[in-house]
Image (cartoon, grey):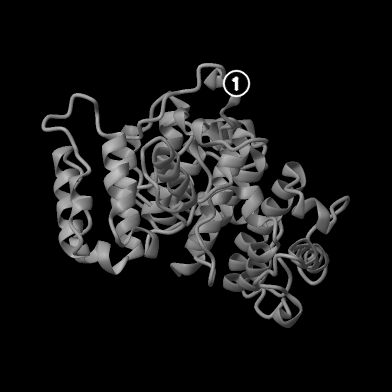
Amino acid sequence: AGLTYDINLINVPGLLQLLRDGETPEDLLKLSPEDLLLRWVNYHLKRSSYKGKEVTNFSNDIKNSEAYVYLLQQIAPANTNPALSLSPLQENDLRSRAELMLKEADKIKARAFISPNDVVKGNPKLNFAFVANLFNSYPALDVPVDRPVDEIIVQETREEKTYRNWINSMELRDTSFVNYLYSDLSDGLIILKLYDEIRPDTVDWKKIYEKFQTIKEHFQKLNNCNFAVELGKEPMRLKLTGIGGADLLDSNKTLTLGLVWQIMRAYTLSLLTKLAGANTPIADREIIDWANNKLKSANKTRFLKSFQDPDLVDAKLICDLIDAIKPGSIQYNLLKNDSMENARYCISIARKIGARVYALPEDIVEGKQKMIMTIFATLMTRDLQGR
């Protein structure tokens, strides 16, 4: 993920050049890093004298080095000395040609990740890394003059990022990295896999489409989304009013976010319930009572009234709780009057003592009740695990 971290509209507004007719910037956000890089390669090939076919993968389509030779010449800075040339194409032996192509890449210090053999054999991972590195070094994309960047870049909200990072941390079976929350969840599969993670055997996979046929794709995805809503109500017992399968399929932001929040909350509480040996899901009140008992037993002087408690925003009470769970873990001389610094510190120490905190420092400072609840729940989980 390191190589592809900066391949987005925020860092490279010039990616807007890759939009096709009728597409919006949001459509680019839905593309995986691989699809974005393939578009980028073809964008530059169209602007060169390349006559080969469109590149649709980083394996078979690049074995003969032809696309690479044209791409390198196209993206190399104009003042490169010695200049890049198309001369490798005169070599008929593909391995020798790949070696000559990589020598061209070396002229712009971009010979990395692959050997001539990797090119000729079409190793997809290493070729992908080679192209990602080319992109990061020489995107060669001008920002469109007719479109002010600030207006059109659709930035991921903090809530979306938190949920997306949480889903990716779950390492679900047969699931690729979630790049864009709404479109990646719109076929229902990830939601159904999350249900099975929280409550094994919830999903009857014989009724679910895991692969889609082009002609029936819409119907098959809707089927999955309908099951996601149905199973969400029973047996998952999520509060799903006013949401139907079509809302997930259509990437309705508000309803998708509401569902993912409930799934994340259910997951966090399911871990707690198992550890507490309870038969019914742990309620907020039980978490608050646990926190106050913990604080009291450690002779702390701050106590929790609710997850909306305004005293939480300076993060000091959460630090007290962490120190109660693992005495000596908080260095109190590091706590300041700066709430944000305290919040960053408290989350880093919570993670250090083994709590799987998904919330961000901003959630504490801004008093985001839902996310603050998850911090206390994950700390309680850590405490029960440590007994």
Residue under the image location 30 percent in, 35 percent down: 75
Residue under the image location 61 percent in, 49 percent down: 181
Query: In the rendered image, is residue 199 in sight?
Result: yes
Camera-side residue of 131 and 89: 89
Camera-side residue of 162 and 314: 162
Camera-side residue of 79 and 36: 79
Q: Is residue 31 above or below residue 115?
A: above
Q: Secondary structure at mark 1?
A: helix
Residue positioned most to the right: 242
Classify 10 Å Cα crowding around label 1: few (below 14), some (14-19), many (20 and above): few
User: On the image, numbered disc 1 is attached to which residue?
Assistant: 151
Q: What amino acid is labelled 1 in the image? A: Glu
Q: Is residue 244 above or below residue 108?
A: below
Q: Position of residue 309 (x, y in %)?
A: 65, 36
Q: Is residue 201 left or right of residue 294?
A: right
Q: Quadrant of residue 239?
A: bottom right
| Figure quadrant of the C terminus | bottom left
Residue under the image location 43 percent in, 59 percent down: 57
Q: Give the mark count.
A: 1
Query: In the rendered image, is residue 331 in sight?
Result: no
Q: Position of residue 72 (x, y in %)?
A: 27, 41
Q: Is residue 109 left or right of residue 250?
A: left
Q: Quadrant of residue 153?
A: top right
Q: Position of residue 13 (x, y in %)?
A: 47, 28
Q: Position of residue 357 (x, y in %)?
A: 49, 51
